Amino acid sequence: MLYKTINLSAIERNYRKSLEKSKKLVFPVIKSNAYGCGLKEVVKTLIGKFDIPLFCVSSLNEARTFLRLKTGCDVLVFETPRERLVDHPNIVYSLNSVKDTKAFSHLKNRRVHIQYDLGHHRSSICTKEKLDEAFLLCQQNDIQVDGLYGHLRIQSDQKAIDEIKALFPYYQIKYKHLCSSETYLLDVGNAIRVGSNLYGDGLDANFEQAIELYTYASRIIRAHKGDTFGYYPGFTATESCLLAELPIGYSVGFLRNYSGSMLYCNNHLYPVVGAISMNSLLVKIDRYLSKKAKFFLTSKDYPLTYFAQNNSLYNPEMLLLFHPEHITYLKD
């Protein structure tokens, strides 16, 4: 069984740091179930401490989940929905094409943020002429434009930064946001979107890691030279050694190509050896360990950066790749 602990207090502190360091309005990004940390739990934690101007999600389905919490807060939907739009006073849609203005005509609540494309091709609005057209169509169709935003492909794209920075002053609207987790310190606009930083992805030392992933050994094996374990080629003991069998495998996201990864237990690093099966794997250890000993994929003392680098993963992937069977929320 794979266990996950989520520290809601760390998420709370990360949001506060985003406010203090950016000196802007901060929109929490809670897509993909709040990066695997629990949309419901994260939202309730944040609104209990802060006056959140806007939450951000990827899909309309995520927005529906958010609305069921009945927070009274607004939520921005990044994607252009394929299904019928939901007419709700707290839903704000991203306008990603001038043609999409027609889709809002039947709504009583018509509020949008216009997305200006900076190279992702997530929006067809990519020139000032197209942007002016979008604003004009919104005015003609009684659509309230609450915000204008863009998304950088890379944080060092100065051309894109200068482009949208030059556009912002032309439009008198409530929210102007470009910056996200990697670019929250840029002096552009009056708001930022904070995603993976909120949950502590390890890419910025100013933010705390909010998750731990761990399991316990199901048994300790005394292996003798020549003993074989697991599916071929598996593991063959070249000498007498100790092995810990852990009850996790690719069914919970610990893939076969993660063999060779280092897990952390009692201040020591131990390698995963042999073939990883659906529900188990082996770790080579150097001493007998208590049944209560935790084997961490990541923890506060073993940041997710280590596992990510060892397996050629992008840090934020670590927040979402694994499927724990037991989740505990805590506040410190």
Image (spheres, helix red, strand yellow):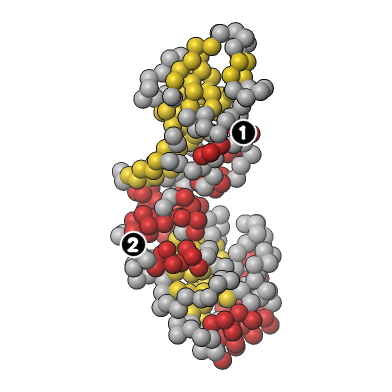
- Is 269 left, or right, of 309 in this rendering? left
Q: Nearer the viewer, residue 231 or 208?
A: 231
Q: Amino acid at mark 2?
A: Ile
Residue appearing at x 64%, y 67% in the figure: 122
Say whether disc 2 or disc 1 marks the residue closer to the N-terminus.
Answer: 2
User: Residue 124 placed where, x, y %?
Assistant: 68, 74
- Mark 2 residue crowding within 10 angstroms, few (<14) / some (14–19) / many (20+): some
Give the left or right position of residue 206, taking residue 117 as reference: left
Decide: is 34 above or below 203. Answer: below
User: Distance between the Cα atoms at labels 2 and 1?
Assistant: 40 Å
Closer to viewer: mark 2 or mark 1: 1
**Is the residue 98 above or below the residue 276 in the image?**
below
Give coordinates of residue 245: x percent, y percent. 49, 23
Image quadrant containing the N terminus: top left
Q: Which residue is mark 1?
A: 256
Mark identifier at residue 15: none
Task: Compare residues 172 and 291 and report the one nearer the observer.
Answer: 291
Res. 262 image quadrant: top right
What residue does disc 2 label? 47
Callout 2: SS: helix
Split into 4 quadrants, where in the image is the C terminus? top left
Residue at the spot x=67%, y=64% of the render? 120
State the residue at coordinates (53%, 19%).
284
The answer to whether residue 328 of the structure is visible from this angle is yes
Q: Are marks 2 and 1 in contact (CB under 8 Å)?
A: no
**Displayed quadrant of residue 127:** bottom right
194 w.r.t. 6: above or below: below
Q: Amino acid at mark 1?
A: Arg
